[in-house]
Image (cartoon, rainbow, N blue to C red):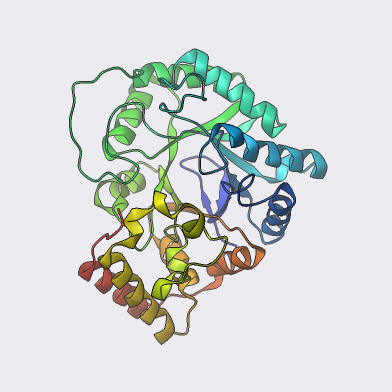
């Protein structure tokens, strides 16, 4: 396993992070336990979850994934071996504290306390804001459309609230998710000028079909030491190749929830996957492992968050750390990106 510093902290996280969002929906608690046991044995020390999980989000499964992780901590008594990341949900879900803005002092404290209870721990290593309260371009929206909507919590107020939580010992570090370059740099600016907690990471999508992070956020991540935690590194399984030629495996995310992912069904996406598949076959590589390794190699990357519904998938994904991508392979991958630029943003 490989390791990198989380932000400018002394915490060394594995460059493969175990994602958990299917536990409580597509995966049972026992399967989640098996995944965590195996991941730790392979050197993974970083687990990411969210109060919102399991996915797809619904009232009935809200908090289920955190509960599974908490039960595992209780059984294994190994909390100290894990760097644990979770997230507070943003606005928009009626069953989460009324659905309105979530990042005021009262709701932040309520969310932290409830996550701690479900996770059966007394501290969270990395606490992330799952998505912005303001209207901006995230969750697949490329263009930014400005509105004069200021009905969201002031960044300084958010950081002050998080500062109090950190000083209480309940949270060690903070991060953002589904954030823009402006959002990240603004939080960092306020942190510096007001001596408030510093954002250590950004959890955004990044994969061979969506490299939009490179456009503005990559430079900020490197210069400010606030690296990417890449979610959806296989583009919801598309970059495993299992959906090639119209295949739709039973139990797969596309089979179960495909109507949530229309962006992966475009002509350019299908063509791009075929080109990447040709590269993997030419160099005798597994497509999923090639895709994950490309993500891991990026200089702005802190950790790649993998999610698996089977042990076979999990083992394949973790083994990607041992794959070698030559300069020629990377050049061929970049040529496909030029031909089919970010077909699934």
Of residues 344 and 175, which is closer to you in this image? Answer: 344
Q: Is residue 169 visible?
A: no
Residue 300, x across and y down, in percent: 38, 52
Q: Residue at x 61, y 32 (%)?
A: 124
* 133 to 245, vertically: above or below: above
Q: Quadrant of the N terminus?
A: bottom right
Q: Residue at x 34, y 54 (%)?
A: 262
Q: Residue at x 58, y 28 (%)?
A: 171
* 265 to 30, vertically: above or below: below
Q: Is residue 109 visible?
A: yes
Q: Quadrant of residue 41?
A: bottom right
Left or right side of 104 for 317: right
Residue 148, x across and y down, in percent: 18, 21
Q: Residue at x 51, y 55 (%)?
A: 256
Q: How many marks?
A: 0
Left or right side of 204 for 98: right
* 139 to 233, vertically: above or below: above
Residue 174, x across and y down, in percent: 49, 32
Residue 217, x across and y down, in percent: 30, 46
Q: Quadrant of residue 31?
A: bottom right
């Amino acid at each position: 396993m490989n390791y990198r510093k989380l932000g400018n902290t002394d915490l060394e996280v594995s460059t493969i992070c175990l994602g958990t969002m299917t536990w409580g929906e597509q995966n049972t608690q026992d399967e989640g336990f098996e995944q965590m046991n195996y991941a730790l044995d392979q050197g993974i020390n970083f687990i990411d979850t969210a109060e919102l999980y399991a996915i797809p989000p619904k009232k009935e499964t809200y908090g289920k994934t955190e509960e599974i992780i908490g039960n595992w901590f209780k059984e294994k008594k190994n909390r100290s071996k894990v760097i644990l990341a979770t997230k507070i949900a943003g606005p928009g879900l009626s069953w989460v504290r009324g659905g309105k803005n979530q990042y005021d002092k009262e709701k932040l404290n309520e969310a932290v306390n409830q996550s701690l209870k479900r996770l059966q721990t007394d501290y969270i290593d990395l606490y992330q804001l799952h998505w912005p309260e303001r209207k901006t371009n995230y969750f697949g929206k490329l263009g930014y459309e400005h509105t004069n909507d200021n009905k969201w919590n002031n960044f300084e107020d958010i950081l002050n609230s998080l500062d109090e939580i950190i000083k209480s010992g309940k949270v060690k570090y903070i991060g953002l998710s589904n954030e823009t370059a402006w959002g990240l740099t603004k939080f960092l600016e306020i942190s510096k000028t007001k001596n408030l907690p510093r954002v250590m990471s950004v959890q955004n999508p990044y994969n061979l079909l969506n490299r939009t992070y490179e456009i503005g956020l990559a430079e900020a991540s490197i210069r400010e030491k606030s690296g990417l935690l890449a979610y959806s590194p296989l583009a919801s399984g598309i970059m495993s190749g299992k959906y090639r030629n119209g295949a739709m495996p039973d139990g797969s995310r596309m089979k179960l929830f495909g109507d949530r992912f229309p962006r992966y069904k475009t002509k350019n996406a299908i063509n791009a996957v075929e080109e990447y598949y040709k590269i993997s076959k030419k160099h005798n590589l597994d497509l999923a492992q090639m895709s994950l390794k490309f993500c891991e190699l990026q200089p702005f990357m802190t950790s790649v968050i993998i999610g698996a519904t089977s042990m076979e998938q999990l083992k394949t994904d973790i083994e990607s750390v041992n794959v070698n991508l030559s300069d020629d392979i990377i050049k061929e991958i970049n040529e496909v990106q030029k031909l089919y630029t970010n077909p699934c943003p």
